[in-house]
Each structure stands twice: as C-alpha cells, then as structure tokens.
Image (cartoon, rainbow, N blue to C red):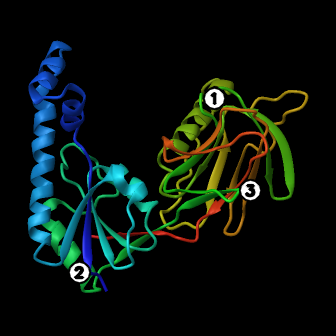
C-alpha cells in the first residue's frame, strides 16, 4: 500500500536566526545582547534535530524515506502511496493536512516538555511502532473534518481549524452574509468559521468574550455559559461574526450559527480592496476577497486521517 515515508520537518528558531544573522555566533550575540537566554534556543534545536535523526534512522529500515521542510509543502506532490510523518508542534499537522488527499499522518511530538501536543500522539521512541502498524494496515485513524472555501472564480482553500473572512488589517469588513435562506449586509471585524478541531482554539476565545460581556450586562450575576466544543469528526461547522455593528444598512441578526452537513455559508464581498480569506491563522495562506468575490464555505469532502497511538 505504501512505497515511501515522507517526513515533514521545520526549521528551529535557532536555524531561522542563523539565516537572519549568517552565523550561530552572531545569532547568540544578538539574543544575549537583548537579554534573552540563548541556551533555551540551543536546547530546543538539539532536541529537535535528535528526534529527526532518530526517526530517519529507524524508519529507513521500514521503507524509503524522504525529508522535506514544511516551506516546500505548497509545491510538493504527495502520491497515493506516501505515508506522512510530521515532526513538530500541532501546527505541523495543521499545515501538512491541507496538502494531502487521504494519506495518513503519523504525528510526532519531538519535545513533550515544550509542546502540549493535542494532535501529536507519538513520541520519537514510539513513532516507529506507529508507522509499522500503519504500513501493515493495523492502525486506527482519527477522521478529522476540514472546511473548504470556494470562490466564484474557482479558487479553493482548505482549513484544518478555521477560516477568517474579513479585512487583512482586521479593521471593519463589509460584506453580505447569506445562510438558511436569509441574507444580511454586515459590518464587522470579520467572520470566523470553525471546524471541530478548531473549536477549542480561536472560536473558544469568542465564547470567552461573550461570557464576559454577559456577566458585565447582568452585573456578574449571570451563570457561566457552557462552552461549545465539537468533536474532531463532527461533520458540522460553526460560524460567528466578530463584533457585528448595527447601522441603518447593516444588521446583526445572522451573527452565529451551525452549518449542518451539506449547508453552505455564503459571503459576498463589498470591499474594493483589502478583503481576505485565510485559513488556520496563516495570513499568507489566503485568497483575495474583494468586490465581486463570492465565497461559499462548508465542510470539505476530504478529511485528515490522523493515526492514533
């Protein structure tokens, strides 16, 4: 079934500083001059490289191995016979998943003391066993729902956690939102559309804000709101309009809702410039959303297959 193991890595903070300052010594001088502990960067770098080296050595006995940096993901062509191993924080899974088409991911936490690793079930010393089970067809998967945004010009973007639709500068965005046969012109600081995997992230912060405002309006006598959290495999998406502003031409009645399976949220840009749709908090991974653009957002057909420990 699988012919190759693709290990996706990332540059450490120290490597990025060396690129910036040309040498390790100059990077160290800069950090220490700014009062920052260089040893923390050094430990992180060493721990990460040790994990990658171990993985490469152990996995080469199982199949052909190829390493790529996550910066090359947009141009890398995965085949149906690739098994993918990510090494890094949870964001590595998020970044990689959008470029796959059903290939399984074995997610490795290279530094458990540094990363919480909600999406990272494997430590370096247990990753080989997880890869072996996957190669032999004996693994269990988490099927994770993703979101998809499609523009009326055919452009398409996937999100693992969430989409942000609004202005690149996060100032007031103007658009028309349509959902469940209703339509409303809105002015807000943007629309957030979240998957189950993202419901504990950015979407949870909007709930924290709503709870705080509710307590304020009720003079701290309001009971705590029960937070909404969707399972990773929940086929639904949830959307919330951030800070909707009511005027004589803009409304606030369609400010939050659940997208059931098959539902689409439609947004028509009314911004001459600066409009954007970006996924998973990465502003560089974006579509322009200016006047004339119509976006339809719903659950994607493809899902992330994350190998369980």
Q: Position of residue 226 (x, y in %)?
A: 56, 47
Q: Earlier in the sequence, mark 3 or mark 2?
A: 2
- Horizontally, is 101 left or right of 154 in the view? left
> Looking at the image, which is closer to me, 210 or 16?
16
Q: Secondary structure at mark 1?
A: helix
Q: Secondary structure at mark 2?
A: helix
Using a 10 Å C-alpha cutoff, classify the residue at mark 3 as few (fewer than 14 neighbours), some (14 to 19) or many (20 or more): few
- Residue designated by label 3: 152
* Residue pictured at 58% horizontal, 66% vertical: 300
Using a 10 Å C-alpha cutoff, classify the residue at mark 2 as few (fewer than 14 neighbours), some (14 to 19) or many (20 or more): some
Picture quadrant where residue 16 is located: top left
On-image quarter of the N terminus = bottom left
Picture quadrant where residue 37 is located: top left
- Residue designated by label 1: 213
Q: Earlier in the sequence, mark 3 or mark 1?
A: 3
Q: Secondary structure at mark 3?
A: loop
Reply above or below: 294 against 211.
below
Separation (CA) of disc 3 from disc 2: 42 Å
* Residue pictured at 28% horizontal, 85% vertical: 138
> Looking at the image, which is closer to me, 90 or 64?
64
Q: Position of residue 248 (x, y in %)?
A: 91, 28
Q: Earlier in the sequence, mark 2 or mark 1?
A: 2
Evaluate if marks 3 and 1 touch, with contact meaning CB atoms under 8 Å apart: no
- Horizontally, is 75 left or right of 130 in the view? right
């Amino acid at each position: 079934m699988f012919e190759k193991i693709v290990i996706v890595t990332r540059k450490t903070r120290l490597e990025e500083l060396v690129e910036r300052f040309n040498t390790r010594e100059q990077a160290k001088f800069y950090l220490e001059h700014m009062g920052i502990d260089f040893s923390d960067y050094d430990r992180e770098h060493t721990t990460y490289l040790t994990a990658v080296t171990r993985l490469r050595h152990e996995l080469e006995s199982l199949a052909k191995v190829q390493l790529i940096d996550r910066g090359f993901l947009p141009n890398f062509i995965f085949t149906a016979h690739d098994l993918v191993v990510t090494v890094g924080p949870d964001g590595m899974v998020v970044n990689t998943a959008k470029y796959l088409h059903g290939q399984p991911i074995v997610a490795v936490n290279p530094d458990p003391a540094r990363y919480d690793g909600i999406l990272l079930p494997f430590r370096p010393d247990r990753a080989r066993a997880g890869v072996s089970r996957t190669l032999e067809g004996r693994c269990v998967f988490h099927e994770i729902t993703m979101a998809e945004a499609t523009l009326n010009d055919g452009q398409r973007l996937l999100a693992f956690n969430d989409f942000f639709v609004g202005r690149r500068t996060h100032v007031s965005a103007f658009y028309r939102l349509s959902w469940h046969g209703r339509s409303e012109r809105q002015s807000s600081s943007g629309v957030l559309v979240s998957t189950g995997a993202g419901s504990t992230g950015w979407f949870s912060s909007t709930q924290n804000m709503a709870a705080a405002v509710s307590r304020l309006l009720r003079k701290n006598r309001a009971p705590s709101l029960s937070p909404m959290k969707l399972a990773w495999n929940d086929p639904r998406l949830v959307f919330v309009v951030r800070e909707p502003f009511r005027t004589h031409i803009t409304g606030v009645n369609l400010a939050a809702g659940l997208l059931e399976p098959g539902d689409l949220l439609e947004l028509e840009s009314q911004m001459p410039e600066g409009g954007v749709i970006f996924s998973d908090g990465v502003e560089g991974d974006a579509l322009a959303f200016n006047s004339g653009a119509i976006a339809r957002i719903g659950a994607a057909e493809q899902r992330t297959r994350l190998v369980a420990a």
